Amino acid sequence: MIAKYLLAFASGMGFLCLIVGLSPVQALPSLEIADKNVAVNQDDGSYEKSYSDQSNLTNNISSKLLIANETQKNFPSVNQQQKIQDIGVDSAVNLWQPIITQPASSSPISYKLAQVTSVSQLSDVQPNDWAFQALQSLVERYGCIAGYPNQTYRGNRAMTRYEFAAGLNACLDRINELIATATGDLVKKEDLATLQKLQEQFATELATLRGRVDAVEARTAKLEANQFSTTTKLSGEAILAGVGATGGAPNQSDPNIILVNRVRLNLTTSFTGKDSLITGLQAYNFLGGADGQGSLQQSLGLASPLLSASSARTSFEPQFPGLNVNTLSGVGANSIQLYKLLYVFPVANKLTLFAGTAAETSDAFPAITPFYGEGQESISRFGNLNPVLRVSGGTSGTGLASAAGFIFNISPNFDLRALYGSVNANLPEKSAAEAVPGVSTTPLGAGLFSGSSIIATQLTFKPSPALDIGLNYAHSYHEINILATGLVSSDIGALAGIAVGTPLTLNSVGGTVTWRLSPKIALSGYGAAIFVDAASNNVDASTTFTSWMAGIHFRDLFKSGNTAGILFGQPLFRSDTGGSAQLTPTGDNRATPYHLEAYYRLQVSDNISITPGAFVLFNPEGNSNNDTTTVGVLRTTFTF
């Protein structure tokens, strides 16, 4: 019991200390950015990662379809840090970058050399240069030395093996020509003696170079013999975290501090050098199941009675822990699952297509906000992404849907993406058995077009180097009465007072903005509205949910590579109802919920980061009967 309060106290004190220390930091002079994990756009000083990396595919897949399209480089990836920040996790950030194999026939960039007839034509060769006489002889006597088009020789530049071969061949051809035309008197014995002397003088250097080349060739041969694959890159992420909480529903005892993990391995394969086949495997030890048993949220009394949706959920926790929501079958702790299977391929200069049987909305859409990063940035589910991206299980963390879509790079500053996703596309028909009254054991329906589905789109644009904007719209159909965001307990039974087996249609709109005040400080926020209507002819009911968030993000805070964030906002909350839907569920005391969060990520090394943080929930789940709740997290992330 003492340990629980110590963790909550430590999280709270860390939060206060962070706030107290922020003001003077803003007055510090700008430092050189050296964060390898969250790359800054070097062309415009952008604070965010490029959009292509910001796509969740990632990282970081986290880690955001990272497109195999050259024009994609013009967009900054909040969801590329991503070296990959959240590999696969963040869905995708960096996993979508194609593997481009250099053709064996490729060669270094060549420079056209111009033949000169006098050494005086070379502007950077002076009579007092130590090699002047040798150059003069080779140019004026043999005509086998060439200069660059700008009349320079660049004698101090290192010579490539290609250039050596070209120069040697030119001289030999000239000597052969002179011999063939009986002008052998031009090649004197003294010249041959000079050449022999030079060879002797530089014998040590030549031997050293020969040894270095041999060593490089040996190492290359070893790497080729032992490489994982010529077409596939392996990346991964492991998260270990301690989580503790206080507060929750009345008459609930505080849960124990828990230790949780999530491990992901991602294989990115390219067959043409421009396409990407992303395969992701994961294992985690979060619990929950159909009724939430074993979850931290259920212990706090803040979870829905089904599927354990809650505002007290951490960023790296799957939406349906311990459950295969397609068939309501259980998933054991640390069992291996396929959470990502997606193929991305360009079909035109500005058009890229993607399709797969294990995908998420966030895989295709850039996150825009710098708080995104399940293993690196915000520690809460609320702080990572706009709720519109999460509708219909769009960020389930388990590759819930089969999906297909496109990415159209309208211009360097405009990017349009859209997808269609179906949750139970692999099931030929819906089960007749019922899990609860009115809900079958395949609650999301069946078939590619007849089950729960979503059509989603995002327009991303960059009106200025310091401003990124993303606009989202999604239209969804659900077989049951849920939002499927996993953000709040009212996610289940979205139409309050209406049977859980009632089908719904949802129209969701949202926007996300990030404004970089400087390369190290950014303001970011989002707004979202979800309009829910009963899809049954027998039910007249509707509800509107709204949510917003605003925060400030810091890079290289106190030390290069470290980041921090403070954010505040309103989780999803019923703002309006119509028909027979209830505005406030029976037994609740309606109150607007708020979320306050602070975290600080310490980049220990290129591959290890530690993030202490805490978030506080006021009027949790929109019910003032619930106590103010504090969730403290100490997260360690390993990437490779």
Image: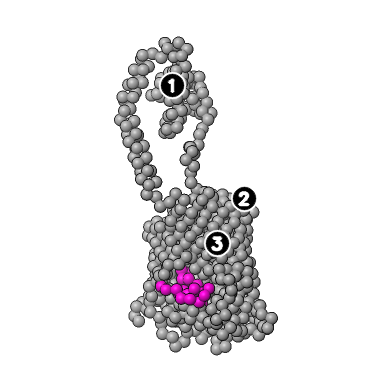
Image quadrant in which you'd find residue 431: bottom right
Is 280 on the left-hand or right-hand side of 535? Answer: left
Label 1 CA crowd tier, 10 Å (few <14, some 14–19, many 20+): few
Give the residue number, with chain letter if any, for mark 3: 356
Q: How far from the left and from the top, in percent, is residue 591? A: 56, 82
Segment tinted magenta in the rendering: 309-333
Along the horizontal axis of the image, is 125 left or right of 450? left
Q: Which dot, 1 or 3, sits closer to the camera? A: 3
Residue occupying the point 35% across, 41% down: 218
Q: Earlier in the sequence, mark 1 or mark 3?
A: 1
Which residue is painted at 55% across and 68% down in the image? 426
Q: Is residue 608 above or below residue 434?
A: above
**Which mark is nearer the camera, 3 or 2?**
3
Q: Please say whether residue 310 is one of the residues in the magenta stretch.
A: yes
Name the residue tied to disc 2: 348
Tag 1: amino acid: Leu
Judging by the rendered image, the residue that carries numbered circle 1 is 172
Question: Does 155 lie within the magenta span?
Answer: no
